[in-house]
Amino acid sequence: MATGTRAVTNELQEILLKYGKDRTQLLPILVEINNYFGHIDSNSIIEVSRYTGVPIGEIHGVITFYSFLGQKKRGKFVIRLCRTISCDIAGKEQIVRVLEKELGIRFGETTEDGMFSLEYTNCIGMCNNPPAMLINDKAYGGLTPERVVEILDSFKLSEYQDMFGYGGVK
Ligand code: FES
């Protein structure tokens, strides 16, 4: 445990040292920590506060404001379903139901195997093809329950292939 904690601290220090020690660097620092560790834990918040001089409360505020930053560890694949008006009226609720049923979790949760997290997001610029969602950086529009099942299956399959070293279908 001590080794793991030290390793994380070293990695955190490496990230911090890429940026200037001032508050204008706060957001890029938080984004990089979040991308690297999958979340921003309390130790990181304290270290970022020391480094940039930004009070801890203010850092919490920034993390809460941006939906792509989080203090909870997320899954390897973060599914962000758009909840803004075009997607909402185009059947977002049926997509919510199928995602929750297929993954066995509710929005705001992560699967036990650490593979998938479910979150809402605001408009992702695919209003011409709603309902839409992101899985990590990739956008999917025109969603139907059947399409969602296909997409999830393709992620599960590619994960299985990675785990067992198959180089085939992606
Ligand atoms: S409203 Fe959903 S992508 Fe714009």
Image: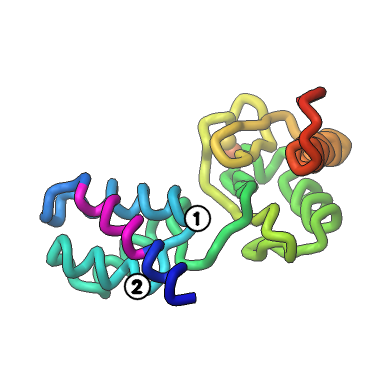
Residue at image point 13% right, 66% down: 53
Q: Indicate if the residue with disc 2 has its beta carbon within 8 Å of ligand 1.
A: no
Residue 57 pos. (x, y %): 26, 74
- Establish if 169 lies above or below 28: above
Which color mode does the image show?
rainbow
**Which badge, 1 or 2, is on the more N-terminal residue?**
1
Q: Which region of the structure is painted magenta? A: 9-17
**In this orientation, which residue lies closer to the viewer: 161 or 59?**
161
Q: Which residue is mark 1?
A: 38
- Mark 1 is surrounded, within 10 Å at the Cα level, by few (under 14), some (14 to 19) or many (20 or more) other residues, namely some
Q: Secondary structure at mark 1?
A: loop
Q: Secondary structure at mark 2?
A: helix
Q: Main secondary structure of the magenta part?
A: helix
Residues under numbered marks 1 and 2 in contact, where contact means CB atoms less than 8 Å apart: no
**In this orientation, which residue lies closer to the viewer: 94 or 119?**
119
Q: Which residue is mark 2?
A: 43
> Which residue type does callout 1 highlight?
Gly
**In this orientation, which residue lies closer to the viewer: 8 or 75?**
8
Residue 14 pos. (x, y %): 27, 52
Which quadrant contains ligand 1? Answer: top right
